[in-house]
Each structure stands twice: as C-alpha cells, then as structure tokens.
Image (tube, helix red, strand yellow):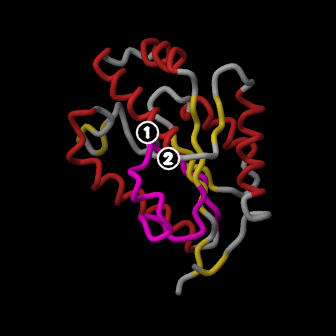
Amino acid sequence: MEAHAPLYLLAGAPGAGKTTLLPHLLRAADGLVVMDSDELLEDGALLGVPIAEPAAAPVWPAYDRMWTHIVTMVRRAGHPVLLLCPIPDPEELAPAGRWHEPAHWALLDCPDEVRQDRLRDRGSPREWDEEAMADAAEGRALIPTVFHSGSENVADLAARILSWTRGAQGRPGIRAS
C-alpha cells in the first residue's frame, strides 16, 4: 500500500467564502499545501471548456478526476493537503470513496441570506441561487464538522480551520492507507 499524507477537505456551496478564505489560509499554512478546486479555472473555464456553471455538469466528473490525480500526487510525495472544494456526493465521504485515507471533511457554511447577497454581489444569475441553496442544504446534511463564515474575521476563521487540520490527527504527516 502506498503511504499518503493526510487530506483535509473543506467543502462549501457557492457563496460560502472559499475564495475569500484562500489567501488567509495560504499565508498561515505552515507546510500544509492549500488548494482551491477553482484555482485552475480562467474565467470559469479550463482550456476554454466552461466548468463553473450548472450547464457544464456533464464535464464535472472529468474535472473532479483531474483534481483527484493532482491531490494524490502531492499527498503521495508526503505533503498534507487542504483542498477547498464543492459539496461532495455522499459516496465521496465513504472511506473507500474517491480519496485515499486519511481524509477528513469539514463544511464551510454561511446563512442563506449571506450566501444570496454574496452571489448577487459577484453577479451570479438568479437561477443559480436555488442550486447554491440546495448544495448548502446537502452539505449541512452530510458533513457534521462546520466552520461558519460571515461575521467572523476571515484571518481568525483561517486560523481555526488550520487548527482543525493540525488537531485531526496531530501535526500533519504521512500514514499508510
């Protein structure tokens, strides 16, 4: 069996605050590789293929597989990873699911009113609001560890999330799967 460094997945529906949180996590990561699953996109597309819109749902599985390979390569090299990602399908949460163990899940969430304001501020079409709300509800039902964005200082929130990654199994390191 290959050894894999720990993986920490911070899932959030659109508007949860992942993009705002990212630079604060990067500044304080202290050896943890922090990635956002939207980082490879340029204006919502990868190599000209739209990804970040509901109409692109048929290509999402391939995009997810690409991220699985990227994260696995980094972990295999012994580096713990914090991946900011969308709400998972329930099968992804299972130990034999998409990710090699050790994998730990948390939810980044905010009140629905805050989410709607954030989506409106970024110019998202109104029809995406319903899907974002449904994603948020699904995340709340699936993931018991929750970090709330909204009223807390973003740097403090980042510090709490990084503390969670260090406390999930002690200081991040390699463990055989």
Taking 32 as reference, is 55 left or right?
left
Dot 2: element: helix
Circles 1 and 2: CB atoms closer than 8 Å: yes
Residue at left offset 68%, top offset 56%: 32
Q: Which residue is mark 1?
A: 138
Look at mark 2 in the image and give the residue it sits on. 142
Above or below 33: residue 74: below
The answer to whether 124 appears left or right of 32 in the picture is: left
Report the magenta residues as a range: 79-104
Q: Residue at x 76, y 41 (%)?
A: 160
The one of 40 and 19 positioned closer to us in this rendering: 19
Residue at (49% x, 26% y) in the render: 15
Q: Amino acid at mark 1?
A: Glu
CA neighbours of label 2 inside 10 A, class few (<14), some (14 to 19), many (20+): some
* Residue 98 is one of the magenta-drawn residues: yes
Q: Secondary structure at mark 1?
A: helix
Under mark 2, the amino acid is: Leu
* Residue 6, image x, y percentages: 63, 65
Locate the C terminus and report the quarter of the image it occupies. bottom right
Residue 51 rendering spot, x and y as whole percentages: 29, 40
Left or right side of 38 for 7: right
